[in-house]
Amino acid sequence: MVAIRSAPETAVSVMPMNGKAYERLAFNRMTRGVADPADPGLVEEAAISVAPLALKAVAAEPLTPKAHAILLMAARDNATQTRIMEAANALDRRDPALQGVVLQSQLNATDYNGAFETIDRLLRVNPELTSQFFPVLLVALQDGDGAELLADLFRGEPGWMTPFLRFAALEETALPDLLQLRKLIQIEDPTFHGRLIESLFKEGEFQEAYDVHQEFFITDTSSDNNLGDWQAGHPPFSWSLADQAGFRAQIKRNGRGLDISADSGRNGFLAQKVVRVANEAPFQITVAHSLSPADQIPSTKLQLRCGNEKEAFFEAPLKAGTAVFRIAQRLSRL
């Protein structure tokens, strides 16, 4: 028993009926024999080569999940795979190696409902495996019924739900399904919504990004386009303020303005925010400030862009006191 993990060959020679030792021996030889674990063909060949050892393990000790995993990988026909998978699932639903093979079989059969349940079992017991299985979940989510199936699972609020949502919100291909998922279940995580909004905006889905922001973060829409509402929050539809040494903008204690400091030679955006404006008529922006020294005021500018375009369609320096900027140019897109 002591030698099973470190020296399975010795354990087998001492006690030929030691099924656990045969299991470890077969699993070690298989993993060492695979040059590229991501190549299904190489994995299958390695499993076939050690299948006789796995059979000895099962014959001597039926409760050997890794031996069942090897036999499942080595099975050549679907009917045999199905019988082994059913027996393995009844045997052990926690062993990562076994459940990983079960999961691959379910994905090959496009059984995404079963795949979600398998991943759920794995991550509840082995949360450290999230980096391995989140990409798989992402593929299953994008299946036709993936959002509905995942919504059913998430109603039980598994512990890996929030980390997965945060991961998926950064993936462009998952955005349509995440929008659908939001309609099916209530998601209360601000970090997820912030990432979702930024990803949607980055991909040019401005209306969708705006709608999510309004729905989740905004309780009072009466001041939605009030640029004087300096409360920083969740970009891009709320203020993003510079916060670097020698280049900073911070909200005054009374919340009615900004304190700005910028060392000589520093440049960039002190404050930026996306707002919706009417496209049919000119609009104006009023800027009141008390910047000093006076000779450096023109170096501070108001700049306007459309969407996430890099080039500004309007740029003008500030003037002392209060300045009104009339934007007469028709915007290319909003």
Image (cartoon, rainbow, N blue to C red):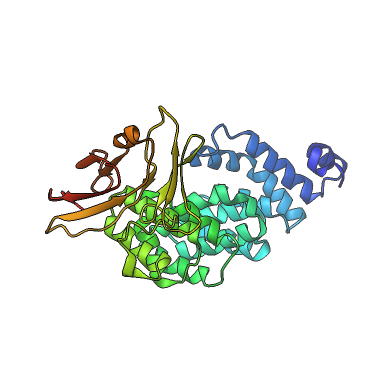
- Seen from the viewer's position, the closer of residues 280 and 133 is 280
In this view, 208 is above or below 304 = below
Residue 30 in picture, x, y percent from top left: 64, 39
Q: From where the camera sits, is residue 95 visible?
A: yes
Q: Quadrant of residue 317?
A: top left
Residue 69 in picture, x, y percent from top left: 62, 51
- Seen from the viewer's position, the closer of residues 128 and 312 is 312
Residue 328 in picture, x, y percent from top left: 12, 50
Say whether residue 251 is left or right of residue 202: right
Count of labels shown?
0
The C terminus, quarter of image: bottom left
In this view, 200 is above or below 15 = below
Say whether residue 64 is left or right of residue 260: right
Q: From where the camera sits, is residue 77 visible?
A: no
Which residue is outermost to the top?
A: 265
Residue occupying the point 63% across, 61% down: 124
Q: Quadrant of residue 222?
A: bottom left
Residue 271 in picture, x, y percent from top left: 38, 46
Residue occupying the point 55% across, 38% down: 37
